[in-house]
Image (cartoon, grey):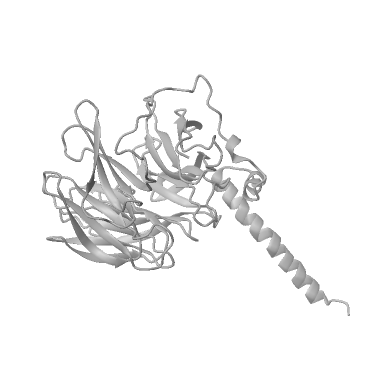
Amino acid sequence: MAPSRFSLLFGLAALAIIILVPWFLVSREADRQGRSVSELISMIVGLRDDRVVSAPVDSRADRRFLERRPIGRSLEGSQPWISHVSIVDLDQDGFTDVVLCDATMNQVSWIRQEAGGSFTERPLGDTILAPAHVTPSDVDLDGDIDLLVAKMGAILPNNDKIGSVVVLENDGQEEFTTRILLDDLARVTDIEPGDFDGDGDIDLVVGQFGYDDGEIRWMENLGDWNFESHDLLALSGTIHTPVGDLDGDGDLDIAAVVSQEWEEIYVFENDGKGMFDRHLVYGATNDDFGSSGISLVDMDLDGDLDVLYSNGDAFDYIPPGPRPWHGVQWLENDGDLGFTYHRIGDFPGAYFANAVDGDLDGDVDVFVVSAFNDWDSPEAASLAWFENDGAMGFTRRILATEPT
């Protein structure tokens, strides 16, 4: 029996939807990344070797302004899992120290710098299962530096309520007491301080990755280490929740990157009294984009805070490994909480990026570490920097291929 005219029209309409909707989504993502559609399609289906995107290091660009130097305890006989490092003068003696989270040892450690540039490492506080992030802050406003520790409970995917909000309270002599402010949570990935309600004390914002169930909350400081939680978002996959005045109105707003199937960045706009309006400021159309971290920094030196954003997570794959769309980008703050996407460059397995003027030429460069590169290759980069040409054009320079 011959198909009816309705059947033909329906089939043509369905075919148009099948073709045009994916093309629209790919076109939109290509526009976000500053690529052609054919280039993005080649990356997605694996037809392109992304390692040739950035210019190779030449003799002119091989600037020896960094000296590689081991610090801390010897790694012989152990395989650390360093989930986060923070640079801070913890004992306020004028020398910069390093505080780190080790998810193998289940420990926060302090690598203290002494006069003459020597370093010694010692553990702080009690055992903390899978510490994911450590943030220095004088939480109790007693003049010394405490440490906020995000306890995941397990780094690998887990639905159990095994996370905690932890403070290592400094007694002023760098002896630390472990305080559990909130327990039995979906896995906690970030804790950041700020006075969100304008009452003069330090409140907290907490990102909970969870697995199927996660959330973002802020914790109002009631005094004497008591806090009241206020929910901001009920989605799994939160990685970082940095704090800053993103709209220039004088109070602290909150940004958040949410991975998993969402691959989105939110801004929670503060009214100055702890009431927040939620804004979705970026969303990738690639469900496997691999969001891995954000920080707030004035990338273009125009006086406002932009968002530096890495994507290189690969826990969704077995085995985990690099993908051609991994890399670094920044969201330019256009005012009124509007942001414009700019791709900085490609970097396999990009896991976190820091912005600093590394070559001291007056602009902001970007340094990025890889967690999921092709470690079977001796040429796989573990650390790179993107040199800013002063006009927000970036060239990738490899700094290290070890450890791999």
In the image, residue 165 sits, relative to residue 5, either above or below, namely above
The residue closer to the viewer here, 67 or 388, is 67
Quadrant of the rendered image containing residue 116: top left
In the image, residue 140 sits, relative to residue 15, either above or below, namely above
Q: Residue at x 40, y 36 (%)?
A: 300
**Viewport quadrant of the N terminus:** bottom right
359 vs 3, left or right, is left
Residue 272 visible, this orientation? no
Q: Residue at x 50, y 61 (%)?
A: 261
Residue 326 visible, this orientation? yes
Q: Position of residue 233 (x, y in %)?
A: 37, 64
Q: Residue at x 65, y 49 (%)?
A: 41
Q: Residue at x 50, y 19 (%)?
A: 60
Tell me how many marks there are.
Answer: 0
The residue closer to the viewer here, 22 or 198, is 22
Q: Position of residue 21 (x, y in %)?
A: 65, 60
Q: Position of residue 179 (x, y in %)?
A: 19, 58
Q: Residue furthest right?
A: 1
